[in-house]
Amino acid sequence: MRVLALLDGTIADPEAPLFRADDLGVMRGDGIFETILVADRQPREIGPHLDRLERSARLMQMRLPERAAWERAVQAVIDNWPWDTDPEMALKLVCTRGIDGGDGTPHGFAMGMQIGEDTRRKRRDGVAAVTLERGFAPDLMDRAPWLLLSAKTLSYAVNMAAMREAESRGAEEVIFTATDDSVLEGPTSTVVIAQGRTLLTTPPSSGILQGTTQGALFRAAEQAGWRTEVAKFPTSALFEADGVWLCSSVRLVTQVHTIDGTAIKADPELHAEITRLYESNY
Ligand SMILES: Cc1ncc(COP(=O)(O)O)c(C=O)c1O
């Protein structure tokens, strides 16, 4: 099931070709995207997602269609989704730099997609993860803006290769580490750990994406009396933590039960509390 909307709000055939072969998004992965969860017609964290899309465009120095166009396309997809049979969808916003040698007019669309069984299983059962080197230092971002660390670009081939590496090691998720052995993020998720009644995550200044799901979780946790901290932490902290989660819009707050083949603390009651906190936002 797919529902595709163009930025003028018209619905298009999701099985018909949409992009030219010389579009820079196709040729070079030169573009940006967002993935938003829509539950019962409500897009979650739409403001932070659109803010992040604009930030990615600024880092990429590419033109971005106006916010109203994205909002129109989002609404068109929501209006055409079969909510009676499918109460949740993953909504992708995609924007490319446009045609190679063109005038820089960006090309974008919004597409709603069903949430796969694989994702539902990860939400339900938790995941085994492996730590993998990402190959950069946590202070690289400011020194090397051309690396686009912290932008959500279409170039996710490395992230997907890391997921295949995890599978080849008998796991289903990855936690990337920096050259100083601090924890970065997952290929499609933000890492959050619990230390007592404190939730801790890596700062975006380390060169990771600012997570909207982690932001929503921390917002609710603070209101409920948890301490939250955004600070660098070493890989060893994963093994000593009271809980480790991978947060992302569609996967939600997924509990990690095993890292590099070692079982870690994965208390089902704490997981239920963290999930309740996140859900209390909606
Ligand atoms: C690299 C990366 N980090 C973190 C996240 C989590 O972000 P969000 O919670 O906004 O979905 C994602 C989402 O896909 C991601 O691709």
Image (tube, rainbow, N blue to C red):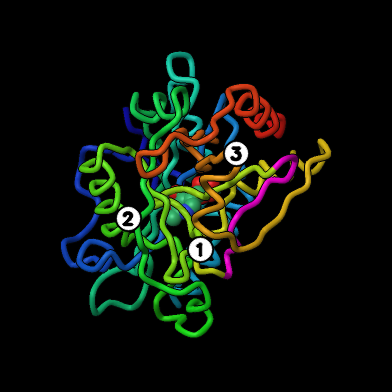
**Ligand 1 within 8 Å of the CB at mark 2:** yes
User: Where is residue 55, by image quadrant?
Assistant: bottom right
Say which amino acid is labelled 1. Answer: Ser
Residues marked 3 and 2 touching at CB (< 8 Å) = no
Dot 3 or dot 2: first in sequence order is 3
Q: Is residue 198 magenta?
A: yes
Residues marked 3 and 1 touching at CB (< 8 Å) = no
Quadrant containing the N terminus in the rendered view:
top left
Nearer the observer, disc 3 or disc 2?
A: 2
Coordinates of residue 19 in the picture (x, y in percent) = 23, 56
Closest to the observer, 11 or 92: 92
Say which amino acid is labelled 3. Answer: Arg
Q: Which mark is residue 44?
A: 3
Closest to the observer, 116 or 235: 235
Closest to the observer, 42 or 136: 136
* For residue 113, side relative to residue 256 (left or right): left
Q: Is residue 69 visible?
A: yes
Say which amino acid is labelled 2. Answer: Asn
**Ligand 1 within 8 Å of the CB at mark 3:** no
The structure residue drawn at horizontal position 49% and vertical position 36%, both measured from the top left corner, is 264
Kindly report the distance in space between the C-alpha atoms of the residues bearing marks 3 and 2: 24 Å
Q: Is residue 130 above or below residue 124?
A: below
Q: Is residue 223 above or below residue 23?
A: above
Q: Is residue 72 visible?
A: no
Kindly report the distance in space between the C-alpha atoms of the residues bearing marks 1 and 2: 18 Å
Q: Which mark is residue 159?
A: 2
Coordinates of residue 178 in the picture (x, y in percent) = 44, 66
SS type, badge 2: helix
Q: Residue furthest bottom?
A: 143
Q: Is residue 176 above or below residue 92?
A: below
